[in-house]
Image (cartoon, grey):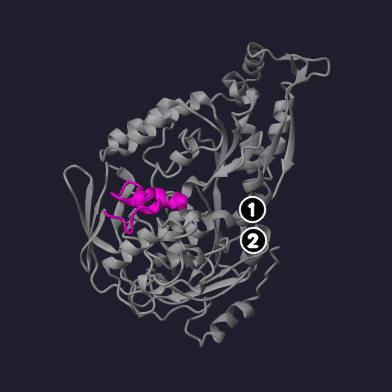
Amino acid sequence: MTREFRATRRQVLGYGAALGGLWVASCVSPATTPGVSSGPRRGGQAVIYINHPDTLNPAISPVSTTIYNTPFFYSGLTRPADDYQPQPDLAESWTVSPDGKQFTFKLRSGVKFHDGQPLTADDVKFTWELISHPDNLVARQIAGFFGRIVGANDFTAGKATEIAGVKIVDPLTVQVTLTDVYAPFLTISAGQPIMPKHVWRDVAVKQLAAHPASRKPIGTGPFVLDSWTQNESIVMHAYDEYHLGRANLDRIISLAPADQTAGFNLLKSGELDAMGLYASVPIDNYDEAKSDPNIEARPVPGLANMYAEFNLRNPLFADVRVRKALSYATDRGALRNSLWRGQAQHINSPIHPAFWAAKPDTTTFDNDPGKAIDLFAQAGWRRGVDGTLEKDGAKLRFTMQTIQRDYDVVLQEQWKKVGVDMQVARMDFGSFWAPLYLQGKTELAGLNLPFGLYLDPDYPLTGYFHSSLNRNKYKNEKVDALIGQATATLDREQRKQRYFDFQETLAQDVPHLWLGVPNEIWGIRKGLNVPKKPTGYLTIRAIKEWYRT
């Protein structure tokens, strides 16, 4: 159970004293030179609130909290620009063969891990093989991003001792050969954090999670971890030898309040400088934050698309007319206004609106109770004496099992108006995920898709929608084909058209009800400059650019 941590300003400053006074407190402005214009400058610290992870080992965890905490400490060969185009990071450059199947990465010279050891091509090959290792079962989702490398699947299956398609040309050059064109390779695969071989090579893969470096990472990122106290704080300082230039801030302290309300109280009192991502300002406090002269309340396009997923094993939901009827019975505008105070948008797609591939006019069957009743009737459902829909003596009754705590009861009320008797079972993640959801035992699952964390539109599509892997037994051969076709060309315009076709085809099938994307409300104290980015995740990835004014 998470216990509340309400740090006082004295306690926050105490971290610095305990670490030898290596930083300048956030309340102290760095020295300036008379006559020099103000702008980004070095010095000071930021006390922030984003949710803490269970591990800081990116080779074993595809979980969102790991994804958005590791950029403090690790780098990939590439990094995303604001338009999600791949930019140089550990790789200073790369070339692509004419057939699009071979990439040659030239690593930056002089890059060092936090312990002073140099980065080499060995670390790249080692990291990708660590992720793809047969014993690394928890990383299967990440390993899929390397599955198109020649020999990768044989390695993961235990049929080879290395990934044959990854060649070390020289200490600073890596050549990668793919079996076929995979457009997201530069963004997703090459963007994976690179880990030090010298730290991990003698650790059994099954013991990775227990190794101390999973909690005290040694990477090449802009910050070095000083301490991590579970459910209290992560303390880090700027890495002087960071290859993209030292961060402006000297130190960051990431606190773990009990919840967002507790975090907002710390923000108001000045004990917190910024909060965002899943730990954004509660929507109920948005007006209060806006009216506070010491706080910037910055809405950012949300990280997660809220949705209800039909289990198509259930004959009730196997009928697309029932799924469309439930979609028509849903008033998403009311959801947006009642739950999220207008700070949300409806995106009928698993592709984030910040992406170039997002289709803005995808069909939505929304807020037409009359059409809902007509479709139910076409499927054989009629109102009974108590108003509930009935068919062959059975009532239209099912349960939503959910880890959400907001839209479930609103849906329940909206659907009751057209004769649907939906029960709600709110659950914690542990009780829901493995015992029910992964076993196909849910009826209607209430979830969210954190699509704002992904660096390419392809990232979630196979796992959620391809018939070979999705969890609700959705199958459409056209959807399967489009997912593959969209990654089989390096032409972005061709990819975009295939993703548009995918989104519309998916919308017509309604395997999910996309309900709304609540904005993240970033709360930023006066005196801290946080660059404006298309998403909160890109805001965190730009941590090097944050500075005190």
Identify the residue at horizontal 79%, vertical 18% (top origin).
387
Could you classify mark 1 by the number of other residues whose Cα lies within 10 Å: few (under 14), some (14-19), or many (20 or more)?
Answer: some
Specify whether residue 154 is painted magenta: yes
Magenta part of the protein: which range?
140-164
Q: Locate residue 366, reporting x and y percent.
A: 58, 25
The residue under label 2 is 264
Write down the quadrant of residue 4 in the picture: bottom right
Identify the residue at horizontal 44%, vertical 60% (top origin).
59
Along the line of sight, the residue nearer the viewer: 144 or 187: 144
Furthest toward the bottom, the residue is 20
**Residue 19 position (above or below residue 478):** below
| Image position of 387 (left or right of 8) | right
The image's mark for residue 87 is: none
Q: Earlier in the sequence, mark 2 or mark 1?
A: 2
Furthest toward the front, the residue is 159
| Mark 2: secondary structure | helix
Q: Locate residue 358, reporting x and y percent.
A: 41, 36
Along the line of sight, the residue nearer the viewer: 176 or 355: 176
Write down the quadrant of residue 128 in the picture: bottom left
The residue under label 1 is 282
